[in-house]
Every structure is written in C-alpha cells, then in structure tokens.
Image (tube, rainbow, N blue to C red):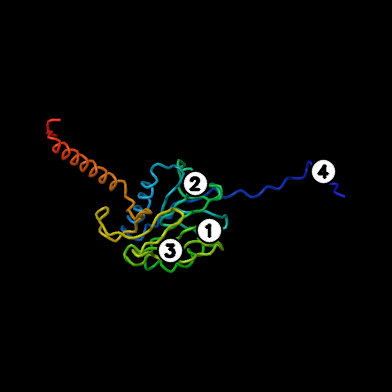
Amino acid sequence: MNTENPAAVVEWEPPMPPTDLIFDDGEPLESNRHRIAMNVLIRSLQQFFADRNDFFAGGNMFIYYSSAQVRNRDFRGPDFFAVLNVDGNNSRQGWVVWEENGRYPDVIVELMSPSTAAIDKGIKKNLYEQTFRTSDYFVYDPFEPNSLQGWHLDDNQQYQPLTPNERGWLWCKRLGLWLGTSEGTIDRETAVWLRFYDVAGNLVLLPEEAAIAQAQAAVAQAARLAAKLRELGENPDLL
C-alpha cells in the first residue's frame, strides 16, 4: 500500500528542449559561386510562389532536430531547403523542428564541392532519408555541369534515384518543378547554374529577370498596338 502523501508526489515533466542554440558557425560557403547558386534557388522559388505565404525557403541555415544533436554540436545546415504548408511570415534564424510543429524540410539541395561530395551523398543523404524523411533530395556541384543527382522518398520511406528526362532535368515532385541547368551570367559570374523549371519547361525567373521580361512584354505589346493602329490608318504618335 502506498503511504506517501499525494501532495508530496511531484508530477513528472518531460525535459524541455534546449534554448541556447547558435545559428552561425562562422564557416563561409565553399565559394562565391556556391553563394550565388544558393541564392538563385531561394530567390527564384520565392518569385515562383510570390502569391503564396505558406512556405519557407532558406539556405546555409542550421536545422535543429534533437537535443542529442545540440549536445554533440552536430550541426546540419543544407545549402538550400524548402518547407511547404508553414507560416511564411515567421522570422527565423534557423529551422528548429520542435518550434515548427515537428516539420522537417520537404526539399533539400546540397551544393557539392570535391571536399563535401562524399558527405553530401553519404552521411547527409542517410540523415535526410532516415531522420528528416525529406521527400526530394538533390546534389549539384556548381563547377561540374553534369553532376546533378537526385532521389525521391518512396512508399517504403527509402530514397530511389531519379531518372533525368531528355534534357537532363530531374523532377521535384514535392514542389511540382523540374531541376535542371542553365548557362548564364548572374551577379557578374558566368556559370552553368542549377535552376527551377515549371511543368511546361519554362525557366522559373529570378525577380530581376521577371521584371525585365515584364518590361519587354509591355514594349512588345505597345509595338503591336502601334502596328494595328497604322493598319487602321491612325497615327499612333498623335494619340
């Protein structure tokens, strides 16, 4: 028979998650090209989803997912990741899973280099598959145009390699977009960049590219209108 005073019994409470998190290890990206490549993915996805506020796209940010990880200082910061169906208004220094209702990234891209390729396709790939359960994972070396690889999580929660289409693009099911390459000059650096393409195969534009395209479309529309007025015997310069 339990003779303890019920009032003296302290109700057990689960340990609280750590709060003394750091969000910057002081380590820069591999190169300026890696930095640009990361921003291209983030900014173009933000442009594509400009009318939505239910997603988060980030890069080179720590993802905290367990107390053991914090204790071991085993930080993981994907070069690019996207999470859907979350509040896009929240300001975040990093992605803290226990503060995000247990949500992990839906899509991750690692921008490889010779020094990180083995980790990106080994330890990190296993982590994203077995712990994060990230739906779509891609790796690409911005200095190696033919290096794009990707995997999709199947019904058995295992990564299966994605098969490229005739253009060498890989389908990102979670975003409903293709990932492929495109040569061009961005931020004064010419390279073969990893880019998103929509279902129809159109390049997902950066905000500045979209602005230029919109201006060009307006000029073309004005030219068509002027030509039509001339056909009707009107002088567009007098209107």
Residue 132 versus residue 10 in the image, above or below:
below
Rendered image: mark on residue 133: 1
Question: SS for tag 1?
Answer: loop
Q: CA distance from mark 3 to mark 1?
A: 14 Å
The answer to whether mark 1 and mark 2 are in CB contact below 8 A is no
Q: Secondary structure at mark 2?
A: loop
Check disc 3 and give the amino acid type.
Gly
Separation of marks 1 and 4 at Cα, in angstroms:
46 Å
SS label for mark 4: loop
Q: Earlier in the sequence, mark 3 or mark 1?
A: 1
Label 1 vs label 4, nearer the camera? 1
Whole-Å distance between the Cαs marked 4 and 3?
A: 60 Å
Where residue 160 appears, x then y in whole percent? Answer: 49, 66
On the image, numbered disc 2 is attached to which residue? Answer: 85
Q: Residue 191 is drawn in which quadrant?
A: bottom left
Amino acid on which the number 1 mark rests in the picture: Arg
Label 4: how many Cα within 10 Å (few below 14, some 14–19, many 20+): few
Find disc 4 in the rendering and name its residue.
5
**Residue at point 29%, 46% (across, down):** 210
Mark 1–mark 2 Cα distance, whole angstroms, equals 16 Å
Question: Outermost residue, front direction?
Answer: 232
